[in-house]
Amino acid sequence: MKTIAITGATGYLGRDLSRVLLERGHAVRGLVRAGGAARLEPDVAPLELDVFDAEQLARALSPGDTLVQLIGTPHPNPGKAAEFQRVDLASVRASASAAARARVAHFVYVSVAQPAPVMQAYVEARRAGEAAIADTGLTATILRPWYVLGPGHRWPYLLLPLYALAELLPGTRDGARRLGMVTLRQMSRALARAVEDPPPAGTLRVLDVPGIRAA
């Protein structure tokens, strides 16, 4: 079993992933801001620190660890462009730098489906985050969902018939698949599978929406 450190472990995806990893027998460490430990799932080992400080993060990691980077702006929308740079991009740059210093075995990042016709500031911040990871040479897996359905995130279920129709038409099929929706459980299981089955050392693997669903 592996030791998995998670930034963003108190969030929508982080809490569900923590439960899945614990059920599968892994040791999970939540790297959280001061005061965040109380919001972690039971049995997640808390470590409070500045999650935007690469030096502090590096000291919290060990060679052989897996680091899952999940910090991001909640409920992203086009009006939060500044937050995408200040939170989403700054956090992944710090985490990737820390992971490289600590020589972790595997870095896992949740990005976003791309290219996309909307949310350009969000996509650009996530694309820049991917570039920061690639620059480190880390063994890494990047997952690119578009929208993750789950508690509090259910209204897009109304769009599923439109997605199904778009996937039938040759002119819209590729875009509908790339920008398709996945469930919270699909994401958590895909992340757990990525943790347990990393790519070859020194390589970067990308899972898009069809890959997330398949995993």
Image (cartoon, helix red, strand yellow):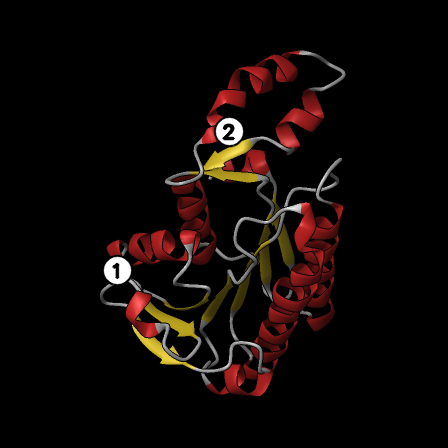
As displayed, is residue 137 above or below residue 196? below
Q: Amino acid at mark 1?
A: Gly
Which residue is under mark 2? 156
Residue name at image x 69 percent, y 72 percent: 136
Q: Can you give x and y, in whole percent of width and height, for residue 106 in the image?
A: 52, 66
Q: Nearer the viewer, residue 63 or 38?
A: 38
- Whichever of labels 1 and 2 marks the residue nearer the N terminus, that label is 1
- Quarter of the image where the N terminus is located: bottom left
How far across and down, in percent of the image, does residue 215 sit? 46, 40
Would you place residue 129 above or below residue 94 in this image?
A: above
Q: Residue at x 47, y 30 (%)?
A: 155
Give the structural element (helix, strand or loop) at label 2: helix
Q: Is residue 193 left or right of residue 141?
A: left
Residue 133 position (above or below residue 62): above
* Label 2 CA crowd tier, 10 Å (few <14, some 14–19, many 20+): few
Q: Compare residues 64 and 55 and report the one nearer the observer.
A: 55
Q: Position of residue 190 (x, y in %)?
A: 45, 45
Residue 202 rendering spot, x and y as whole percentages: 64, 66
Q: Which mark is residue 25?
A: 1
Amino acid type assigned to the residue bearing label 2 in the image:
Pro
| Image quarter of residue 22 | bottom left
Residue at the image position 60 percent from the left and 70 percent from the top: 91
* Residue at the image position 53 percent from the left and 83 percent from the top: 58
